Image (tube, rainbow, N blue to C red):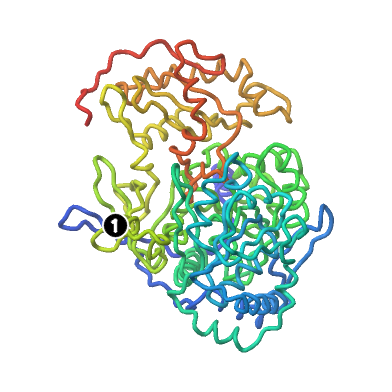
Amino acid sequence: MDHIISSAAKQLNRVRAVRLGPPGMIFERRSDGCFIARNPHPLDRYPEKITDRLVHWARAAPDRVFLAQRRGDQTWRTIRYAEFQANVRAIGQALLSRGLSVERPIVVLSGNDIEHALLMYAAMLVGIPYAPISPAYSLAVKEFSRLRGIVELLQPGMIFTDRLDVFGNALRAVSFCGAELVTSGDPSPLRATPFEVLSRAQASAAVDRANAAVNADTIAKILFTSGSTGVPKGVINTQRMLSSNQAMILSVLPCLADEPPLTVDWLPWHHTFGGNHNLGLILYNGGTLYIDEGRPLPGRFNATVKNLREIAPTIYFNVPRGYQELIAALRRDEELRQRFFNRIQVIFFAAASLSQTARNDLERLALETCGERIPMVSGFGSTETAPSSLCPVLQSGCSGYIGVPEPGVELKLVPSGNKLEARVRGPHVTPGYWKHNEMTAAAFDEEGFYRTGDALALLDRDHPEKGFIFDGRLAEDFKLSTGTWVSTGELRTSLVAHFCPYVQDAAITGHDRSEVGALIFPDYEACRRHARLPRGASDSEIASHSRVRALFRELLESFAAQSTGSSNRLTRILLMVSGPSLEAGEITDKGSLNQRLVLSHRAELVERLYEVHPPDRVIALHAACPDTEKQSGQ
């Protein structure tokens, strides 16, 4: 009998055999009170420029598909490595002929498509900075001040868009700064240059001379962060940053070298997660990326499901809402389950935001389908670090686990109140912000470490070599009107744990108010099951259902009952009916919730939360109990 139980336990703990990097971390305390953490293993050599990997794979695997994209709703249009490189060289020639340069870079207003990728790597090949801009600055606003500010800052020589019919209003609203407008769609609305004009150019020796002049310090990209106010910051990404970071990722995920990685991915290329991490990972390791036109939104995830029914990935990336949609689809579709888990080696999720419930559900579905758990990997980084700095090499059951520094990364932890601020140094770190010297100087400390503004904590204080968990944004902490500090990251972690499995994440409210509240992003699938609602029920139906509201009131009351004072006593919550948006910057590069932007974008909901007579959607307790904490503001 004991043998049967032991065999069953082993079966439950069986993990798909996948090579992950060697474990370990050196963790030291310095005399100044700071801590230094680094990987004990050296970083492997990496190419001087990321396009060297394109040259390599065009020779080593010329007929392997690099990118694939749907033709409408039907067949896949593919481009192979040798063909892609030939097109990149031709377009590089066209860019040089137009006199584009650091002073006259390229701006891209486009989704993910093959033409976008060709232009991106052509620019990198010949040393012309490329700046992809979030479509949200063109499509999700009534005025275009941020887009206008970015274009004026960059002074581009070329602006590319895939759809003039979509981006036309935004382009009409900003000055082109004398830039040539190029499109892969219908050029007539604004008399643009057709993209095929660029690809018909004949590459000459000028392309080789320009590529020879590109070095590790050459600017490859300018990626704009999602600032809550003002013009977003332009983060310089050099060739060294992109190449070294991919070498770091490969060192902790050596399985990428065992088989060319294959993925189905929608994450946008204007964002460091999609454009640097995911697309870069595929190119660096000679893999294939199927461009997913789906989105983790109601009615738009069906396209993703269709793609995953056809394509079995070896590695998969998504944000928490995407996994929530995927889990629901996997539950009801056995064919999809079999295909998805068939040969997948790694599931990569956004570190601090994936609910424990979602992680457990994925593990359970994998066990039921293929008898194995699939390694799940998260990480820590930012636009300024290209992006990856930390990654797990051990499997932990904690969704907030972000692992250890990757080879080549130095991590400095500086005491800040009762937290440790993370600062990073290494070849993957930006030299600064485009045309903002003061901002650049402020971003680094006296030793050259980049100040992330994030707090980290050890997973296990008795075994620091296991690495770190994410501990929130330092800038997100705030004071109540009483002067009491609220530790947002700590409170959010406690909230999600207490409300598990019914909460995915939360934005904490209460700045300059007397009570702490929260905008709650429910785990809609867990809530649907609790309310016994049918599959297909909308998020709004789920969030407003009487059983769900009764559940959250009970959880809110029990959470408040265990509080020690006003800084951790939650008195009111509002259930969101739309998840946090990556496009709008509500999810950070680290995969965590951008508290400031969520509250800024949903300011009207915050006001409703604190109304004297709040609407029915608000779940509120009676007046807060007297504060038992000191009102010193500490």
Name the residue beneath numbered marker 1: 412
Residue 98 versus residue 147 in the image, above or below: below
Secondary structure under the numbered disc 1 in the rendered image: strand
Q: Is residue 314 visible?
A: yes
Q: Residue at x 28, y 43 (%)?
A: 419
Residue, far right: 74
Q: Amino acid at mark 1?
A: Lys
Residue 196 versus residue 174 in the image, above or below: below
Apparent side of residue 616 relative to residue 344 in the rendered image (left or right): left
Q: Residue at x 58, y 86 (%)?
A: 208
Q: Residue at x 43, y 48 (%)?
A: 401
Quarter of the rendering occupied by the N terminus: top right
Quarter of the rendering occupied by the C terminus: top left
Where, by quadrant of the figure, is residue 330 drawn? top right
Q: Residues within 10 Å of mark 1 (few under 14, many from 20)?
A: many
Front-lying residue, 106 or 430? 106
Report x, y in % for residue 120. 60, 67
Report x, y in % for residue 345. 61, 59
Report x, y in % for residue 529. 65, 27
Report x, y in % for residue 543. 61, 23
Residue 38 versus residue 516 in the image, above or below: below
User: Looking at the image, how many numbered discs can be counted on the residues?
Assistant: 1
